[in-house]
């Protein structure tokens, strides 16, 4: 297991190196002159020269690339070209809100999607299955902003004191923050639960037709044990794979949910940085999201050996 984890960790480091190299080339080579972007259209030649000197842009490309990688290894993502604040601290301040949003919603969408998918697969062509199909179609068809605004309208506009209590403003991770996160959790979970329901249903239908499931039933095992211990355990492999991808990617892509509910997370930071052209912050967020995806996929690979006995790390 240790060798397996080390190999996956080395693969993740290689992916992060490729991503950082691609981002470096895109931002500092293909995107033109960053000094011109920072200085603005009215910047003088002397001002541009000073900006390039401060950012190290007057150095050869290979030297700049080495300096870039050296700072990354030390956790230094540079400073914001607009605020002058360290990018790492800016991301860290926003990351706690986004992580709480994604992790809280992930519990709801994973548990709800898996449970609904299992019920749908074990009761194929029944009323439960048809209702689950209708739920999947609704979840996949409705945009994120529609779900968020609809929940605000129902719970905030129509529920009186209850809705107001759920949406009171508050600082991150303090006072009524957990109450304020209720609606964002529900909105984000609803959007992803539909996909997990469909994925779990398809995987369960495939697994329930396997020979070892029929053998387990012929031995007289209860249907609950056959479904949940033998069937679901094997069917969760593709579901967990998708869960790892979604968990990592959503760290940087909850823009709509954060915007509607007024949460100051990483998504909002990306939008603000793109608006003002704050390249170092955008670069830092991309690398942070890539790290989250790599870590999430590493955890998924480790979980395979516990979920499916047919999978063993070599």
Image (cartoon, rainbow, N blue to C red):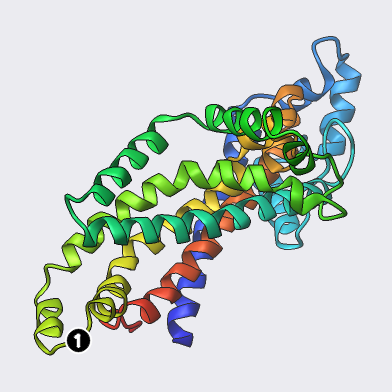
Q: Is residue 50 above or below residue 210?
A: above
The answer to whether 236 appears left or right of 287 in the picture is left
Residue at the spot of label 1: 221
> What residue appears at the point 85 percent right and 9 percent down from the top-left corner?
42
From this viewpoint, is residue 7 visible? yes
Residue 23 image point, x, y percent: 59, 41
- Give the quadrant of residue 302: bottom left
> What residue appears at the point 41 percent right and 55 percent down from the top-left corner?
113
The answer to whether 308 appears left or right of 47 in the picture is left
* Image quadrant containing the N terminus: bottom left
Q: Work out whether residue 97 or residue 223 is closer to the camera in this orientation and state it.
A: 223
Residue 253 image point, x, y percent: 58, 40
The answer to whether 136 appears left or right of 31 in the picture is left
Residue 31 image point, x, y percent: 61, 27
Number of labelled discs? 1
The answer to whether 9 appears left or right of 231 in the picture is right
Of all residues shown, which one is farthest toward the bottom? 219
* Image quadrant containing the C terminus: bottom left
Q: Is residue 144 above or below residue 195?
A: above
Of all residues shown, which one is farthest toward the top? 42
From this viewpoint, is residue 21 visible? no
Residue 96 image point, x, y percent: 75, 54
> What residue appears at the point 64 percent right and 27 percent down from the top-left corner?
153
- Give the quadrant of residue 275: top right
């Amino acid at each position: 297991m240790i060798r397996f984890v080390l190999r996956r960790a080395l693969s993740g480091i290689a992916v992060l190196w490729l991503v950082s190299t691609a981002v470096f080339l895109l931002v500092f080579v293909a995107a033109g002159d960053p000094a011109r972007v920072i200085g603005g259209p009215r910047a003088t030649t002397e001002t541009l020269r000073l900006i390039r000197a401060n950012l190290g842009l007057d150095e050869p490309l290979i030297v700049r690339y080495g300096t870039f990688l050296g700072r990354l290894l030390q956790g230094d993502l540079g400073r914001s070209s607009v605020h002058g604040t360290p990018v790492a601290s800016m991301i860290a301040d926003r990351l706690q809100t986004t992580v709480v949003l994604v992790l809280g919603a992930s519990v709801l969408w994973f548990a709800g999607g898996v449970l609904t998918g299992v019920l749908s697969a074990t009761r194929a062509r029944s009323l439960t299955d048809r209702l689950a199909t209708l739920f999947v179609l609704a979840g996949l068809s409705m945009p994120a902003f529609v779900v968020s605004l609809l929940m605000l309208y129902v719970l905030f506009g129509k529920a009186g004191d209850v809705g107001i209590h759920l949406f009171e403003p508050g600082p991150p991770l303090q006072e009524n923050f957990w109450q304020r996160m209720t609606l964002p959790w529900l909105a984000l979970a609803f959007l992803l639960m539909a996909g997990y329901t469909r994925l779990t249903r398809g995987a369960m239908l495939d697994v329930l037709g396997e020979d070892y499931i029929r053998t387990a039933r012929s031995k007289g095992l209860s249907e609950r044990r056959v479904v949940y211990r033998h069937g679901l355990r094997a069917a969760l492999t593709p579901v967990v794979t998708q869960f790892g991808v979604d968990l990592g990617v959503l760290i940087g892509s909850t823009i709509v949910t954060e915007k509607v509910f007024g949460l100051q997370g990483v998504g909002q930071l990306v939008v603000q940085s793109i608006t003002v052209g704050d390249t170092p912050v955008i670069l830092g967020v991309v690398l942070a999201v890539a790290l989250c995806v790599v870590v999430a996929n590493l955890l998924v690979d480790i979980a395979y050996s516990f979920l499916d006995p047919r999978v063993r790390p070599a």
